[in-house]
Image (spheres, rainbow, N blue to C red):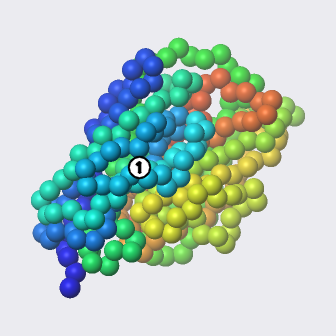
Amino acid sequence: MTNNVNLYCNVKMGQFDSSGNGSMVVTCGNFGPDNATGSVSFKFITPFYVNVPTLPTVTGGTSSWLYQNTAAAVPSIIKVAFSGIAAGSSVAITVSLKLDANAPTSPAAGRAVFTTDAGNTVDVDSDLTRNSWPVYTVRQSVNSPTPGSVNLYYVHHEVPLVIGGSAQEIPFLFYNGAGSLLSGTHSVSYFTFSTPFYTRVPSSGRPPGFSALYENNDPAIPSVYQLQLPAGIGSLGAGVATTVDIPFQAQSGAPFGHYGSGGIYVPSGTDTQGDYSNSHHRMPFLLVATGAV
């Protein structure tokens, strides 16, 4: 016999102070009608430029790192596990946050998720539309930094992904707004992103220079990937993109609608970028039941 549960989460984000200290309160609950008696968990993937200085302490919950990376341009993932949650009840989780001193004014996107765990066959959640909540940083305005030698940013084509269907090659276009003829990036650059809710990057069809920083087979837990691009981005002009196709696949059981994750494109080596406001943004994907939209 299985339990019919309806888990959800929502986030109240606080503002960071002048020292970069802040917090958010995540409410995780179960609309029911049945109690969840198996393992359930809250997951949080940090926005870029934000770290979790200490794991949250939650009554009845066990906190752990799924993936920890203190680099400003790479997200981390924490988990708070529970041995169930009663119907009609909720738990408030306060997560301490630390904003990087060099973070741009534009908010970065993270995500909170509350779901049954992959090995939980006792509890069935048939409505996943309220299990994922975007998290955006809120900070005091800062002065515009001094421009660097490059101005990297990216866009991607929003190709619908059929739930449970085959993978789609998504074109990502990488630009150097400071590039000119025969004058592009001098060093390699890096595009780092996390996968959206119930979306994966299959191993087949991954482009050259693509690597996994963290992978998880649970569709509710994002994976983190990084693409290394060669030097010379923008060497044909600021408006000429370098295009790379990355395969994405919507997994079976995914909810319908728009679901996104964060991506960031940054330089390395001798290349410098003063303002990172355009280098990162939320990557939306449309998950559909059929090929028609």
Query: Judging from the image, what secondary structure is the residue with disc 1 in?
Result: strand
Dot 1: within a 10 Å radius of its alpha carbon, few (fewer than 14), some, or many (20 or more) residues?
Answer: many
- Left or right: 272, with 142 as reference point: right
Taking depth in this image into account, of 141 and 67 the one nearest to the observer is 67
Q: Position of residue 172 (x, y in %)?
A: 63, 52
Q: Is residue 237 visible?
A: no
Q: Quadrant of residue 239?
A: top right
Can you say whether 15 is above or below 241 in the image?
above
> Which amino acid, mark 1?
Phe
Please tell me which residue is depicted at 75% across the width and 47% down the height of the picture. Answer: 229
Q: Where is residue 268 in the image (x, y as percent from the top left)?
A: 75, 36
Taking depth in this image into account, of 22 and 127 the one nearest to the observer is 22
Can you say whether 127 is above or below 77 in the image?
below
Q: Can residue 63 be seen in this view?
A: yes
- Looking at the figure, which quarter contains the C terminus? bottom left
Taking depth in this image into account, of 133 and 96 the one nearest to the observer is 96
Please tell me which residue is depicted at 68% across the width and 69% down the height of the picture. Answer: 205
- Left or right: 94, with 157 as reference point: left
Q: Mark 1 points at which residue?
A: 44
Q: Where is residue 135 in the image (x, y as percent from the top left)?
A: 38, 42
Taking depth in this image into account, of 4 and 253 the one nearest to the observer is 4
Q: Position of residue 232 (x, y in %)?
A: 82, 40
Q: In which quarter of the image is residue 177?
A: top right
Can you say whether 11 is above or below 291 in the image?
above
- Looking at the figure, which quarter contains the N terminus? bottom left
Please tell me which residue is depicted at 54% across the width and 75% down the height of the picture. Answer: 166
